[in-house]
Amino acid sequence: MKLTSEQVKKVSKLANLPLTPEEEEKYSEQLSKVLSYIEQLNKVDTSLGDEPTSDVEPTFNVTGESNVMSEDETGECLTQEDALLNAPKVKNNMFETKGVFEE
């Protein structure tokens, strides 16, 4: 679908966007490409497979996999000393950072 400069002018006026003639031409081409792509998408059968006119099987999961979850397992944890080992500043056995809400 090719948009005319008049149509672009009308849209820009509705959007309150002042455009130069060069911009009108540029946006006319760009919007025309977008509308052409949308026309292509409208031709694709996206109806549900249980509708009588559709031969498309509904696809909810393309891999066929379900949620694969691993078991929760406990393991070794860092000690507080190890966790604070590379901290630039430590105070009262905790990380010390610059105040966020200080005035």
Image (spheres, rainbow, N blue to C red):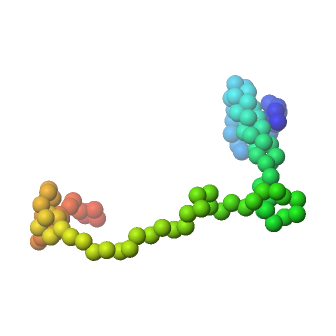
**Closest to the observer: 77 or 55?**
55
> How many marks can you see?
0
Q: Is residue 14 visible?
A: no
39 left or right of 76 in image: right
Relative to 15, is 58 above or below? below
- Residue occupying the far front of the picture: 64
Kindly identify the residue that appears in the image at 21 percent across and 70 percent down: 76
60 left or right of 4 in image: left
Position of the N terminus by quadrant: top right
Kindly identify the residue that appears in the image at 17 percent across and 64 percent down: 83
**Location of residue 29 (image quadrant):** top right
Relative to 23, is 77 above or below? below
**Closest to the observer: 45 or 57?**
57
Q: Is residue 25 visible?
A: yes
**Closest to the observer: 54 or 103?**
54
Relative to 96, is 24 above or below? above
Residue 96: x, y in percent?
17, 63
81 left or right of 6 in image: left
Residue 48: x, y in percent?
78, 62
Residue 27: x, y in percent?
71, 33
